[in-house]
Image: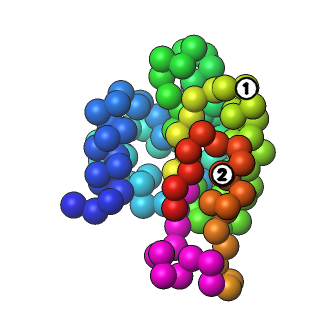
Amino acid sequence: MKVADAVAKVLKAEGVEYLFAYPVNPLIEAAAKLDIRPIIVRQERIGLHMADAVSRMSSGEKIGVFCMQSGPGSENAFGGVAQAYGDSSPIVVLPGGYSRHLAQIQPNFSSALNYRHVTKSCEQ
């Protein structure tokens, strides 16, 4: 089992119905196999706001989930993450990433350092 499959399985067990996503992320296909409907967006921040809307409209009973590609894609979503954090809206953000031995090496970009300031928890 690949990590994306394991993450999708957890999302399904938690009752996630929709995965808002900006390609390319292996979680999109893994979630679709488990009948979690992927909704592909054309800009990362928009997808983040859509996931945020799921959480807000259900008063936090449903959690909005958004995944995107690594690098600059995760930075494009930063404003939406900061907005949700500032308003205490529960969301799950799952950016793609580089292998740990490649993180922090040019030209690879790691947004984890920035996200630590506007999230409850941030892991790389």
Name the disc covering residue 87, or none.
1
In the image: residue 91, left or right of residue 109: left
> Which residue is painted at 48% across and 82% down in the image?
101
> Which residue is painted at 53% across and 82% down in the image?
102
Question: What is the three-letter code of the residue carrying label 1?
Answer: Asp
Q: Can residue 45 be seen?
A: no
Question: Helix, strand, or loop for circle 2?
Answer: loop
| Residue range highlighted in magenta | 95-105
Question: What is the three-letter code of the residue carrying label 2?
Answer: Arg
Question: Helix, strand, or loop for circle 1?
Answer: loop
Q: Which residue is mark 2?
A: 116
Query: Is the N terminus in the top left, top right, bottom left or bottom right quadrant?
Result: bottom left
Nearer to the camera, 85 or 2:
85
Q: Where residue 27 appears, x then y in whole percent?
A: 42, 54
Secondary structure mostly taken by the magenta-highlighted segment of the chain? loop
Q: Quick check: is 72 in the magenta stretch?
A: no
